[in-house]
Amino acid sequence: MEKLTVMLLLASAVGANAASFPFILNELLRIDCGVKGKTTETYNNQTWYPDSFFIDPGKTKQITSSPNVPQVMTTLRYFPNGEAKNCYRLPLTNTKKFIFRAGFYYGNYDGKSQPPVFDLSLGGQPWATVNSSATADVPDVHELIYAPRNDNISVCLMGRKEYGSATPFISSLEATYLDETETANKTVYGMMRNGTAYHLVARLNFGGYDQVIEPWSGWSDTCEEQLNRYWTPQPMPGYTNLTFVPTTCTGTAYENGPPNSVINTAISPTNASQSIYVPVNFPAATPQSAYIVLYFYQDLGPDNVNATRNMDVYVDGVMTKNVKLQKYRSGEVVTLYPVLVQGTANVTISPANGTVLPPLLNGMEVFYATELAEEASSSNGVFKISYSVIVVGVCQLFVILFLGLV
Ligand SMILES: *[C@@H]1O[C@H](CO)[C@@H](O)[C@H](O)[C@H]1NC(C)=O
Ligand SMILES: *[C@@H]1O[C@H](CO)[C@@H](O)[C@H](O)[C@H]1NC(C)=O
Ligand SMILES: *[C@@H]1O[C@H](CO)[C@@H](O)[C@H](O)[C@H]1NC(C)=O
Ligand SMILES: *[C@@H]1O[C@H](CO)[C@@H](O)[C@H](O)[C@H]1NC(C)=O
Ligand SMILES: *[C@@H]1O[C@H](CO)[C@@H](O)[C@H](O)[C@H]1NC(C)=O
Ligand SMILES: *[C@@H]1O[C@H](CO)[C@@H](O)[C@H](O)[C@H]1NC(C)=O
Ligand SMILES: *[C@@H]1O[C@H](CO)[C@@H](O)[C@H](O)[C@H]1NC(C)=O
Ligand SMILES: *[C@@H]1O[C@H](CO)[C@@H](O)[C@H](O)[C@H]1NC(C)=O
Ligand SMILES: *[C@@H]1O[C@H](CO)[C@@H](O)[C@H](O)[C@H]1NC(C)=O
Ligand SMILES: *[C@@H]1O[C@H](CO)[C@@H](O)[C@H](O)[C@H]1NC(C)=O
């Protein structure tokens, strides 16, 4: 009983602080960890907010060398208290699907040249093991899509004995509300289920853009990325690159709203009777349920009377879907879920009976699913974890006072 009272007292104190949070919470949270004030990323004009609104424990640090990484990765928050659980609380005002993304760039900030390994959790459940040495020179980024059950979800970092109780750190944290207005009369990532987290394995753009297709500030170009996703170029040796002249802003009219830059390039076999073969590697070899999205689009110009492209999609040799593009400008988005995988998946797009044009593939997203039994939130649960680290001393004081009063 004493404990509960103490927790409620603390909760209301912290809640007051969060209430003064000065910007809109429910659509896009871009948090630059360890930075003092609001920042603007120089190369893409994105606005990032300091993390002090969302967490109390930890120390901040600026990376001193001038690394060739985005500005947001040059500051971080670290937690010298080893195996303690240190949490951010994200005050999301909505419990629909969000993209959660966390970025880690070690940059030898402590001068020890010992990039740590530690645990990352979401809503009290395992999210990822961060191994900052596996990606020494580039930020390590973990992303998943999940519909929180509670509107104050926690993101926690914790060292582990097996990993030497190393000091956890974090460079960036984002939560993007996936607008549930429909595209092509379909809910975005509509086959994703509540209570399940979908961990991103790959989000690929095929056929010729070398740069990462990413969201730009203000989302002013409505033909481009609207959902704060990053699309990685995937060169495919041995295939032809197709580039369609973007005559219309069609991408975002398709399911999941792919950006124009993704759907206007594609790969295709050099020979109409050949297939496209894309091997996918998953981080674990254990059996998993995969969520695969394939983007098909062509824009051949109105003079092209032979626009028929008939394709069969196979996963691990099993025919799963037929895709037919028949008009000179047409597209289709195919979602395959659940697909049982064990470490790898082989996606093959083959020419189907009656096709005139060879198969093509414009983009692909791959996730694996985990059940996420989120802890009950209410202010209690989350705050107890979030602030336990700093308030241990204070708690004892409160308990003493409380007992004294009784
Ligand atoms: C950067 O974004 C701000 C608003 O977020 C806008 O006013 C400004 O024009 C943008 N600058 C550029 C160069 O796009
Ligand atoms: C972290 O990554 C490094 C480099 O890839 C690897 O040698 C090490 O075993 C990994 N540590 C853990 C705990 O997975
Ligand atoms: C969406 O549904 C409406 C009404 O059923 C229909 O008129 C429209 O063509 C559909 N749009 C697409 C892109 O399928
Ligand atoms: C998931 O939960 C949201 C909000 O609670 C609800 O609107 C939506 O219909 C649910 N979706 C499914 C597939 O159950
Ligand atoms: C296709 O584009 C990629 C760049 O994304 C390039 O590496 C590759 O060489 C191109 N392929 C051909 C056949 O030109
Ligand atoms: C296309 O591939 C088929 C089967 O591999 C082969 O028989 C045919 O000669 C190829 N055509 C060309 C033009 O390379
Ligand atoms: C269209 O395709 C058919 C079958 O491949 C072919 O016979 C015909 O010549 C093509 N027409 C044009 C205009 O390319
Ligand atoms: C995928 O293809 C590779 C190479 O052909 C093969 O070694 C692997 O067993 C295949 N994976 C599955 C699940 O079929
Ligand atoms: C392919 O099409 C031809 C003619 O339309 C038909 O005779 C044949 O049975 C079809 N093959 C398959 C596998 O569907
Ligand atoms: C979430 O946090 C806000 C702001 O601190 C608070 O007003 C709200 O009651 C909390 N919601 C829950 C379910 O705890």
Image: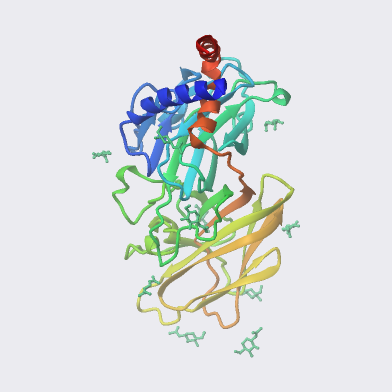
Where residue 214 appears, as percent x and y from the top left, is 41, 46
Residue shown at 50%/40% (left/top)? Answer: 101
Residue shown at 45%/52% (left/top)? Answer: 209
Taking the image as shown, residue 142 lies to the left or right of residue 186, namely right
Tell me: residue 192, above or below residue 312. above
Tell me: residue 115, above or below residue 354. above
Judging depth in this view, the residue of 357 and 288 nearest the camera is 288
Question: Among all residues in the image, which is located at the extreme front?
Answer: 406
Where residue 238 appears, as percent x and y from the top left, is 59, 59
Tell me: residue 314, above or below residue 122. below
Residue shown at 30%/44% (left/top)? Answer: 218
Colour scheme used in the picture?
rainbow
Quarter, ligand 10: top left
Where residue 309 appears, as percent x and y from the top left, is 51, 76
The answer to whether residue 108 is visible is no
Quarter of the image that includes the N terminus: top right
Taking the image as shown, residue 275 lies to the left or right of residue 398, namely right
Tell me: residue 325, above or below residue 226. below
Count of marks overlaid on the render? 0
The answer to whether residue 82 is visible is yes
Judging depth in this view, the residue of 225 and 395 nearest the camera is 395
Where residue 149 appears, as percent x and y from the top left, is 52, 45
Judging depth in this view, the residue of 358 and 191 nearest the camera is 191
Residue 262, image quadrant: bottom left
